[in-house]
Image: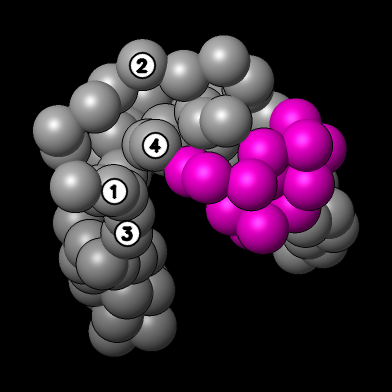
Amino acid sequence: MKKIKLLAVVVLAAFLGGCATLAPVGMLYTKVNVPMQMGDGKDITYSKVGQASANSYFSLIATGDASVDAAAKNGNIKTIKYVDYHVENILGVIGTYTTTVYGD
């Protein structure tokens, strides 16, 4: 009986204990856009958009390059105006993390 109580406490702590994350995380499903700070905020016009993504599988394997640099290169952007970050994750099984860069 003690082992069952200890296991219950550990599982409960795992579900309730939060990790510091860049984006809000839903235990069952997450789909959020998170703005990132970039640039001076004076001129928000842009002519190009670039994206880069990374994926995770079963919260065990993660692959890809979702860096700002990769997104800028994919959009042939030399001057970054601002950056958005998009997260979509279903039950921790399949996750997609996309960085979108806007600039010229």
From the viewer's perspective, is residue 37 above or below residue 26? below
Point out the tag, 3 or 4, that comes first from the N-terminus: 3
Image coordinates for residue 49, horizontal then vertical, percent: 63, 22
Disc sitting over residue 29 in the figure: none
From the viewer's perspective, is residue 64 above or below residue 2? above
SS category of the residue bearing label 4: strand
Q: Are marks 4 and 2 in contact (CB under 8 Å)?
A: yes
Which quadrant of the figure contains the N terminus? bottom left
Residue 38 in view of the camera: yes
Point out the tag, 1 or 2, that comes first from the N-terminus: 1
Point out the tag, 4 or 1, that comes first from the N-terminus: 1
Q: Which amino acid, mark 3?
A: Thr
As measured in the structure, the alpha-carbon distance from the residue carrying label 3 to the one carrying label 4 is: 24 Å
Of residue 101 and residue 19, the one placed in the foreground of this image is 101
Point out the tag, 3 or 2, that comes first from the N-terminus: 3
Q: Which residues are magenta?
A: 67-80
* Residue found 78% across the figure and 37% down from its top: 76
Q: Residues within 10 Å of mark 1 (few under 14, many from 20)?
A: some
Residue 66 in view of the camera: no
As measured in the structure, the alpha-carbon distance from the residue carrying label 4 to the one carrying label 2 is: 8 Å
